[in-house]
């Protein structure tokens, strides 16, 4: 895989873990996201190529309606770890993610529905949608 694609995966794959969007049955509180989540989804590179990703993420409360997120994702191109900071209320959270290995940042959106979430990541290197559950 091309270096640019690998770099994007490493940036988005882990970030994807940190993002989630979906319909919610009931409002989520800060304590609802805390802990470990895992799941899978798709990473789309700026070249148009796509790869399946498997991810694990840990959400740690870091203030009123805010979380620090650490995630690791794997695709056929490799494995990468990232961090994110999100803030929100109810079932909707937004923030930024950072991949220090490739010095890449992007936006993250998370929607929570019960014990699952859909994470959406966007950067100048591509995008990802990852579904996580407990």
Image (cartoon, helix red, strand yellow):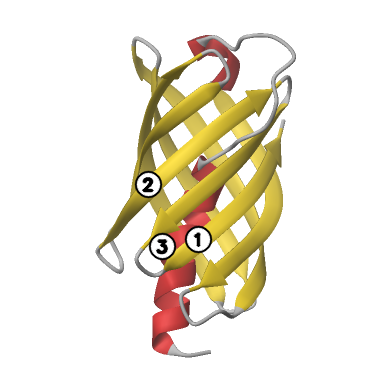
Task: Indicate the secondary structure of the residue bearing disc 3.
Answer: helix
Give the label, 1 or 3, closer to the camera: 1
| 10 Å crowding of disc 1: few (<14), some (14-19), many (20+) | many
Which residue is pictured at 62% across the width and 70% down the height? Answer: 75
Q: CA distance from mark 2 to mark 3?
A: 11 Å
Q: Residue lying furthest bottom in this view? A: 2
Give the label, 2 or 3, closer to the camera: 2
Numbered badge on residue 107: 2
Percent coordinates x, y for residue 25 in the rendering = 75, 14
Quadrant location of the C terminus in the rendered image: top right
Which image quadrant is residue 86 in?
Answer: top left
Which residue is pictured at 53% across the width and 51% down the height? Answer: 16
Is 14 placed above or below 58 here?
below
Sequence-wise, the earlier of marks 1 and 3 is 3
Residue holding disc 3? 11
Disc 1 + disc 2, Cβ < 8 Å:
no
Sequence-wise, the earlier of marks 2 and 3 is 3
Percent coordinates x, y for residue 123 in the rendering = 37, 60
Q: CA distance from mark 1 to mark 2?
A: 9 Å
Q: Which of the pair 43/77 is nearer the observer?
A: 43
Is 65 placed above or below 33 here?
above
């Amino acid at each position: 895989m091309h270096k640019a694609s690998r770099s994007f995966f490493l940036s988005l794959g882990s970030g994807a873990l940190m993002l989630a969007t979906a319909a919610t049955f009931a409002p989520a509180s800060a304590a609802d996201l805390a802990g470990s989540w895992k799941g899978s989804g798709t990473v789309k590179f700026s070249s148009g190529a796509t790869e399946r990703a498997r991810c694990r993420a840990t959400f740690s409360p870091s203030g009123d309606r805010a979380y620090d997120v650490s995630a690791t994702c794997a695709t056929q191109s490799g494995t990468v770890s990232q961090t994110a900071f999100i803030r929100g209320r109810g079932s909707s959270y937004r923030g930024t993610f950072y991949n220090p290995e490739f010095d890449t940042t992007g936006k993250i959106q998370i929607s929570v529905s019960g014990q699952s979430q859909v994470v959406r990541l966007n950067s100048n290197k591509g995008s990802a949608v990852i579904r996580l559950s407990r």
